[in-house]
Every structure is written in structure tokens, then in C-alpha cells.
Image (spheres, coloured by chain):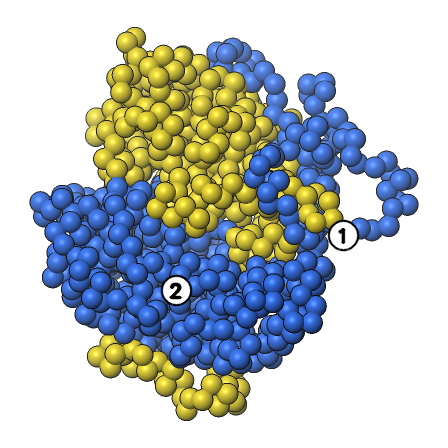
Amino acid sequence: MNAYLPHSDQDRAQMLAAVGATSVDDLFAALPESLRVAGLALPPGLTEAETRDHLQLLADENKLWGHSSFVGAGFYRHHVPAAVRAMIGRSEFATSYTPYQAEVSQGTLAHIFEFQTAVCELTGLDVANASLWDGPSAAAEAAFLALRATGRDRIALSGALHPETNQVISTYAAGPGFSITPLPVDETSGQTPPPLSGPPSDTGVVVLQQPNFFGVVEDTAAWAKAAHQAGALLVVVQNPVTLGVLEAPGVLGADIAVGDVQPLGNGLNFGGPSAGYMACRGSLLRQLPGRLVGRTVDAEGRTCYTLTLQAREQHIRRAKATSNICSNQALNALAATVYLALLGPVGLRELGSLCLQRAHALQERLEALPGVTAAFSGPFFHEFTLRLPFPANEFRRRLREQGVDPGIPLGRWFLEKDRELLVAVTEVNSPTGLDRYVEAAGRALTEGVAA
Amino acid sequence: MTPGLNEPHASRPAADEACLEPVRRGIDPLVFEQSRPGHRGLDLPPAGVPEAPLPRLLPGVALRAQPPRLPELSEPEVVRHYTRLSHLNHSVDLGIYPLGSCTMKHNPKLNDELAALPGFAELHPYQEEDEVQGMLRLMWELEQALCEITGMLRVSLQPSAGAHGELVGILMIRAFHRRNGDAQRDTILVPDSAHGTNLASATLGGYKIVELPSSDRGLIDVTRLRQSLNERTAGLMLTNPNTLGLFEEDICRITSLVHQAGGLVYYDGANLNAILGRCRPGDMGLDVVHLNLHKTFSTPHGGGGPGAGPVAVGPALEPFLPLPLVQQRAGAFRLDDDRPLSIGRVKGFYGNIAVAVRAYAYILRMGGEGLRQASGDAVLNANYLRTRLHHLYHVPFDRTCMHEFVAAALKQKARGVLARDIAKRVLDFGMHAPTVYFPLIVPEALMIEPTESESLESLDAFVEVMRRVDAESIEAPEVVREAPHSTPVRRPDETRAARRPVLRWEPDIA
């Protein structure tokens, strides 16, 4: 008896008779004797209530920071509206497959078309796909797209990319053997300055993050000019939540924009799932990886939507496809679309401004504490890097004891940056929460002086 | 608000006109078309801190000149729009979804509830390890269960989907050969019945592809395989049972031949549902296996994601697994990044963890015996459908199948009705269609995978529909050729969509 399996023993007997077999095991006769196993060494199945209790115990072992956390670095703690959860929880969206049969998938196709539109609007670029696996893998796909378009095989990576984005691009590049050139970061401003002589002449693509990993806003326009002078394309990896306030990468000259839509209505979930977005200039359309939904009409002339330009994709082109990607992250993209529909253009600008103002207020107050300085002088959005008078790991430990998770120490990725802490502020970090942070930091720093 | 944006759209009828129009089938206007200036669906608090003007904080050129044309709607408007859209979808919760190769089984509701527990859902990936021991324990225990199910040594939960897992497998095979000074191995062998992703992933990984023709029994031709193996062979990618739903009976000889030639063997786990608790890829000699948690382990497909494609390996490839791996010592868990031979990362953080939580709950709920029963029922259901349908639809490899079988609509084609038409006609009866035109080696293919979730009554209803469509192909072929008739929209004009691509809404396109 198993609640997920409908057949009774009687049903099975009736079906076996129809098939002409005497037992279910008979149906596995093609398996060589030597391979057959009698069963799996797994515990017996649990009831629903038992399973729930078991997972609740595991969940209870984890610490929840709620709005006392200032940890970002790629995944951000924003409020996820109840309406977003309710819409992505609808089983018509959640329990359907990729919309291969358009006639019974218009719900999914229409919301993907809306997502593509929203991404074009945010990025100021001409076309966007149905989403990719996440931000870092979208950045790798974007770099490959640019190399296909330019026919070159060198990727230039800003040193201020998220280290995991850098690693993902490097992992992908190992397959075809593409070369990678690191672009150094200016240690004063925290920006990646375009080199006077431009990137190496065989560079096909420059990848820049906006705001960058250290929270600093880069000069997209200057990089677009430098990349184009060298005959390369510019990929900008941008946090979409900034795009109500910051200029669209397409307007500033980027050829491809990618990023992760986690900040738009997707929860943290210990790092996944989320969705990557990708938009590019119209001239690059045929090189775009991933699913695309197009608008058309049906046999009665009514507006409808369908997967289109599939000749780029693996199930048609097989070895010659633009990518191996076959799914997108439809449900996470839907969360972003519903979120943007709730916020609207005014809400997105207000949200960005709110995060930014609170981040600047916090940074100013922390910087006023003894021994604390801003690590970089460049402009920032809602995340910034502090330099502390002692190791950031110790600072984090002391603040956690006081009920604040103050940010992520950069020593995790950069050995020499062991006194630097990356702090993210969003709309969930209330003014009272900022006060608590400053007070806790004050105490932690005094303790440091005494020791 | 910039003037000129989000103005009422001309395509929306005025209120009195709308009331007079009878309700029509079709699609709700896009969220952009329903936008009304000043509507808003989410409140934000005031900043509550001293604010500086933006141009003081950011360079002018960095500030947005034109706001994005996002829609403006209140919460009830947004909720109605997406609820209406949702009604246009077929889904597993509505009815049978016999899409071959996709394993559209029931998605238990418990799983969603558990993945949403704040103790999992609200964890940041960069919390300190001592704060996430329950999460890491779950990942560890899921890995142990997947190792037992597959007979492999270690698992990385990082890949986002099956194709992503394939890329990881290929990059590990590449790293293995380079480590052994075997960089000249530049070819991956793939059967001609393979999923398109296998070839695309191997190409993305920098390999040349050699396709192996299937034998007349629909299996890998061992003689041809032997002839194709040489010092350039990096590996073979296969799925077992294969895409025809047939078990590769010579699997042990196949893996040992590839190994003798110095290659490795990749197992595409898309069809693992057929063999749960019956046999294990590790025992077949496979070196690397990807699993589709969204197929075999019951997590929702989401209309095309998120899924999860964990990769399991044997000893040869263990050092090359992506970063990081969960390690256990003295009852404590940590994430191990210090693995010098690793291929690196293929996505941010650790994987699609909310999907992993669902799969873990499913495995606990089923237990070893339940999983074995699931594969038994899946195979029984497929054979039941095959037996009930093979008089009406040609089945090219008509013997006991595993979890799916492939029919060929050849008789129907002779009557002017194609596999595509049959699929469209099935939609009229509130059922999803089988996969069509795959695998490529079967003409007019209808690939049918009922999964273990369908009751006998549901299977009989599907048989009845397939009988009726066959009868219609004789008596009224135009009804099938013009299908579907009762779906929210009818066949889209694909040619128009591709020739004049409209890939986004613009104020003036509608």
C-alpha cells in the first residue's frame, strides 16, 4: 500500500493477465541475471506525518536570521510577496512540462512572453530568452554567444566579478579550450578600469558585473567603448533589482546583459533554484541560447504564443545547437514576472532607491566607528565593502553573538582581504535593524580595542 | 512617471463594451496590455533614514533616464491575470501526461509544503556552516540515498538540470583523460537513438561526436561499437533503458569494451524510473550518471524548470566532481572546496536545493520497497498500454518494454494522418499528447510513457481515446488533421512565428 501508487493488487493482476505475464518481475526479464538486485538498502517508507516530522527536525537545526541578516553576495533577502508565492504555487503552472504542445500551454507561453518583454524593458536590449539556469551559468552562456558572434576565442573577465561567476565561466571555457584574461581591479575605487590600450586584440568578449562583486558601480559606457574598439562584445552581469535606478546596460552600450532574477520575487532556498536572464542586441538573435517564445496567430486568427526559432536548439540541431540547454527555469522566471507586475516601474525605482538610501546611511554610520573605513571609494548601490581593524571573520562572530549577521567576509575568496566585509542592505533591513547593527558593531569594535 | 508610458492600451475595450461582449475562449490580454497608470500591487515602507539626492550618490550617467515600461496593476488585477492564464495549461494535476522521456509522474503535495519550511527556504547560501547543519545533513543523506539507488560512490547536487549534469559529466571525462596524459581522446560516441542534449553537451564540452547506428533490435550494435572504439575515444554516452524503452541487454559487455579501449561510459539518467530497485547503473560498469530529480524523484517540472540534475560518479571520476562537496566528520557537516582536481563550478552556490528537499521527502516517503514498486508499476503500465494499442498502432520493436514504448503512426500516415495530428487530437480529450517525432530513428514516432501514477481507469481512458483517434483516421481524417478543436487556442501558425519573430510586447504590436 503506497498512497502515491494507485493500483490495487487486483488491478495489477488484471493488467498482468492482459499483458500475458505472471508477475511484475517477469517484465524485467531483459535485465541480465547478474545485474538484478532484490531491493535497495533504504529504510522502509514513512507515512506523510512521519516524513513531515523528520524534515521539520532537520529544518529546526538551521538558524534563521530573518531581517537581522546583511549577507548578500549574489543572493539577496528581499520580501517575497504572498501573491507571488500563490501564483507560482498554482499547480497548472507548477506541474506542467515545457510547453511543447502550445494549444494546452498558453498559460506558460504567455507568461514567458511577458518575462521576455520585461527583461528587454529592464535591460534596454532588443531580445531576451525564456531564462537560463542561473546568473553565473547565464554569464558563461553569454561569453560563449559573444565568441560565436566574433569568431574569437579569448574571454576577458573583470576581477570584480563574483568569484563564483568567474569560476563557472572558467569551468565552461575548459571544454572548448577558450583563453581567459583577467582584468585587474583598481584597489582604490574598487572599479575595473578599462585599460588604456584596450583588452588584448584577440579578445572576443569582456565580462563586467554591475554593481560589481564589491558593490561598486562600474562604468559600463567606458567599457562598451573599449570593448568595441577592440572588436569585442561587452557582456554585463547585472542585478535586475537595480534597473529602476541604474541606466539600462543596453543604453550604455552593452551587447548582452545577463544576471540572476533571484532578487525579483524568488526566495533564498540556500542558493537555488533561481533563474538566469539573458538579453542581447537583435543582430545576435540567431546565436541566442535557450528557449524563445513568439507571438503568432492560431488557425482561427486569434493571438497566441508558441516556442519559436527552435532551429537553434539541441532537440533539432543536436551537436550543432547554440547550447545544450533544454529546459529554462520557467517557474522562477514567473516569480520575477509577477513580482515586476506588482511593483511596476515606479515601485521598482522606489525599491532600488530605498535599498540604496538605507545602504548609504548604514555605511556612513559604520564608517564613523573607530578603525572602520570604506574599502573602496567608488560609488555603490545597496552593497558595500568595509575594511575593519581586525579580521572580518572575528567581527562576524562577535556580531552573530549579538543577533546580527553583519555580512560576508571576503577572506573566503581573497586571502589578502581578510579584514574586509561585504555588507548588503535591502528593504527588509529596517531603520531599527540598522540601529541594532551599528550598536552591535560599536560593542564588537570596543572589545577589539580592549583585546 | 514619464508621460507617454503605460497609457491605456487601445486593444482593451471600454468598460461598457466589455460587459456586452459574450465571454470568448482565448488568452487574457498580456499584463502589459492591462496596465493603468497609478495602479500598484506592492507597498514599500519609507526609507526612514536621512536621504541624499541620487545624483549625489551616483554619477549622472549611471542613473536611468527612461523608466522601464513595466505594467502598473493592483494585486487583484495581477492575481486574476495569472490565475486566468493558469487555466489555459494542461498539467499533471489535471490529467494524464504520457510524454515519453519526461516521466510526468504525480508531484506529491507534501514535498512542496516541506520545501517551503522556513528552516530550509529562508537560508542564505553564505550562512556559517554551524548554522545550516540540518540543511547539510539533508544534502548528505540525499546523496547517500542516490548512491544506493545508482550504485555509485559520490554525488554532486550542483547541476540545475539533466543537460547541465551531462555537461558536468563530459567535463569530468575530459579532466580525467587530461590527468592521464590522454588529451588526444577527442571523440564521444552516442547512439543514434540518443537525446539531443547528449550531443549538444558533448559538443559544448569540446568533443567531436560519432553516432552509432542501432541494431535491428533497437539496441547498441556491439560489433559497430567495437569498430568505432579507438585511441581517440573519450567515452560513450547512453541511456538504459534506451529511448525506445528497451533495456540494453549487453550493457556489461558494452561498458567493458569501452573501458578496454581507455574510454569512460556516461549514463543519461532520464530513464532511471524504469529500473529503480531492480538494477543499478554502478553495477553495469557506468562511470558517471546524471539523475533528473524532476523526473524520477517526483519534483514538479514547473512548465520547464526548475529541475535538478545531480551527477553521481564511481571512483575514477570522484576527484573531478564539481565544487563544493558535502563532507561529514564526527557527525558534523561542511562544504568542501579544497579539491584540487575538481572541474570547478557550473552554477552559483550548491544546486537547486528546494528541488533536492522535495526529492529527499519523496525518497523517505517511498522507501526502498516503494521505489521498487514504482518502477514495477511504471513498467506494467507501459506494457499494458503497448498490449492494448499495438493492434492499432504499429510498434516497431514490439516486445516487453520498460517504462515507455515507441509506436509509429505508419498505418495512420497512409490514411493521411500524421503523428503530429494524432497528438493534437489527443489534446481535445483533456489529455496531454505523447512525445512525437522522437527518437529520430522511428518515423512518425509516438513515444508513450504513462508512469506509475496512472490508475487502470486512467490508462483505459487513454486507450479509448487512442482507439477513437485511430477510428477517426479512417472515418473522418480531417477531424484529426484539423485538431485540436476544443483547446483554448487551435494550432499556432509556427511558420509565421519563425519568419517574422515577435518575441516581446511593444505598445504597437497588438
Q: Colour of chain A?
A: yellow
Question: At 19% across and 51% down in the image, what residue appears?
Answer: B234
Question: At 26% across and 41% down in the image, what residue appears?
Answer: B206
User: Which percent across, then down, holds residue A70?
Assistant: 43, 34
Q: Chain of mark 2?
A: B
Instruction: Report crowding for label 2: few under 14, some 14 to 19, many 20 or more residues within 10 A (C-alpha).
Output: many
Question: At 45% across and 23% down in the image, what residue appears?
Answer: A255
> What kind of element bears circle 2?
loop
User: Which percent across, then down, holds residue B157?
Assistant: 33, 53
- Tag 2 residue: B243
Callout 1 and callout 2 share a chain: yes
* Quadrant hosting residue A189: top left
Q: From this viewpoint, is residue B440 visible? A: yes
Q: Is residue B498 above or below residue B390?
A: above
Q: From this viewpoint, is residue A55 visible? A: no
- Tag 1 residue: B25
Which quadrant is home to the C terminus of chain B? top right
Q: Is residue B424 above or below residue A124?
A: below
The foreground one among B93 and B334 is B93
Which quadrant is home to the N terminus of chain B? top right
> What kind of element bears circle 1?
loop
Q: Chain of mark 1?
A: B
Residue furthest out toward the top:
A196
Instruction: Report crowding for label 1: few under 14, some 14 to 19, many 20 or more residues within 10 A (C-alpha).
Output: few
Q: Is residue A222 above or below residue B351?
A: above
Question: At 87% across and 46% down in the image, what residue appears?
Answer: B21
Residue furthest out toward the front:
B414
Say which amino acid is labelled 1.
Answer: Arg
Q: Colour of chain B?
A: blue
* Quadrant hosting residue A304: top right
A414 with respect to B120 (left or right): left
